[in-house]
Amino acid sequence: MTMNDTLTIGGRSFRSRLFLGTGGYPNQKTMLDALKASGAEVATAAIRRISLEGYGESLIDVLGDRVTLLPNTAGCLTAKEAVLTAQLAREALGLDWVKLEVIGDRELLYPDSEELLKATAELVADGFTVLPYCTDDPVTCRKLADAGAAAVMPLGAPIGSGLGIRNPHAIEVICARSPVPVVLDAGIGTASDAALAMELGCAAVLLNTAVSKARDPVRMAAAMRDAVAAGWNARTAGRIPRRFGAEASSPQLGLIGS
Amino acid sequence: MTTIRVNGQAEPLAAATVAELLAARGIGPDARAVAVALNGAVVRRGDWPATALNPGDELDIVRPFQGG
């Protein structure tokens, strides 16, 4: 049996199916150690105004060539803002792919599907590989793929909530129908959530807070690495059907006393 | 008006070009991972020296930060 374990999104190929965020770690060393322990080959980055006082050490100086950065448009509220942020990211990093976030509610950080679709179409037309962060809605995911998104990234639960995958059925449906890879983004709280995402059919998992805010981020990063690999292996291996009753796994013949 | 807005803050316009303004902040032509937008449009690095600043302009200077 051959099994393709390589993840390919927009022409980029990776062995790891875990994308790790770089925000909110207790310090820089912990972030770097966690990245290493996670085995992630992709790390997200925000694009922000520099401080007016001057120009210090950049994230890219810290990370070097350890990982491929995936710039995001976090915090953008309109397609216009998100498109400009993506274009600035491309200019700053020389990367034409983007985690597209267009937020419709500052408290819930829920995606604004209408603006997201608009920004996706504009960025695809501008030559970007677009990975939109979106709602766990099969119709929105299909529309994003139709608009040229290279992957769709439905949320499991609100960003940073750690609530896990609130609607596993929706994620499973999205995975079953999506013509592009599905990356579960946001909501992961612990390792079993990441494993579940993969078992439901996701191609990869993107998480940040579950690692950066864990008591021991480096150990949690290792747990996520293992969970994503375990979930992928389980999905690929094929789970047994659920049964109402028992089915003995020991021989029924040769019992003593029979 | 002789001011411009840099990253959202008004300041006196004291540079003729984007490159001059950046240089005054220690951002040279070889600075890694910096990008600039003037009035909502990206100014490519190669165009920094030739892009004039005018009163009322809005300039954004960005770079990657830690984030999810």
Image: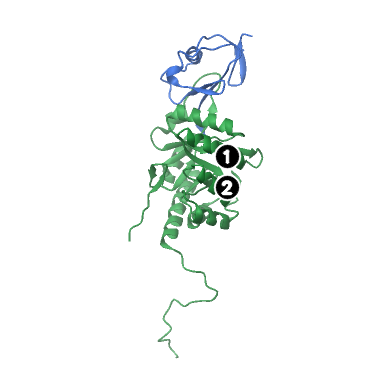
Up-down: is A140 above or below B21?
below
Give the left or right position of residue A76, taking residue A237 as reference: right
Q: In x, y percent, where is residue A190?
A: 54, 51
Q: Which residue is mark 2?
A: A140
Amino acid on which disc 2 is placed:
Thr
Q: Earlier in the sequence, mark 1 or mark 2?
A: 1
- SS for dot 2: helix
Chain designation of label 1: A
Up-down: is A84 above or below A182?
above
Instruction: Tell which of A227 and A14 is nearer to you.
Output: A14
Whole-angstrom CA distance, mark 1 to mark 2, is: 10 Å
Amino acid on which disc 1 is placed:
Leu
The chain coloured green in the image:
A
Do we see residue A44 in this rendering? Answer: yes
Q: In x, y percent, where is residue A206?
A: 50, 45
Label 1 crowding class (10 Å Cα cut-off): few <14, some 14-19, many 20+? Answer: many
Which label sits on residue A116? 1
Q: In x, y percent, where is residue B66?
A: 51, 34
Type of colouring: by chain
User: In which quarter of the view is residue B30 placed?
Assistant: top left
The residue located at (42%, 58%) in the rendering is A233
Q: Quadrant of the C terminus of chain A?
A: bottom left
Chain designation of label 2: A
Up-down: is A251 above or below A168?
below
Q: Are marks 1 and 2 in contact (CB under 8 Å)?
A: yes
Instruction: Tell which of A11 and A63 is nearer to you.
Output: A11
- What color is chain B drawn in? blue
Instruction: Tell which of A153 and A40 is nearer to you.
Output: A153
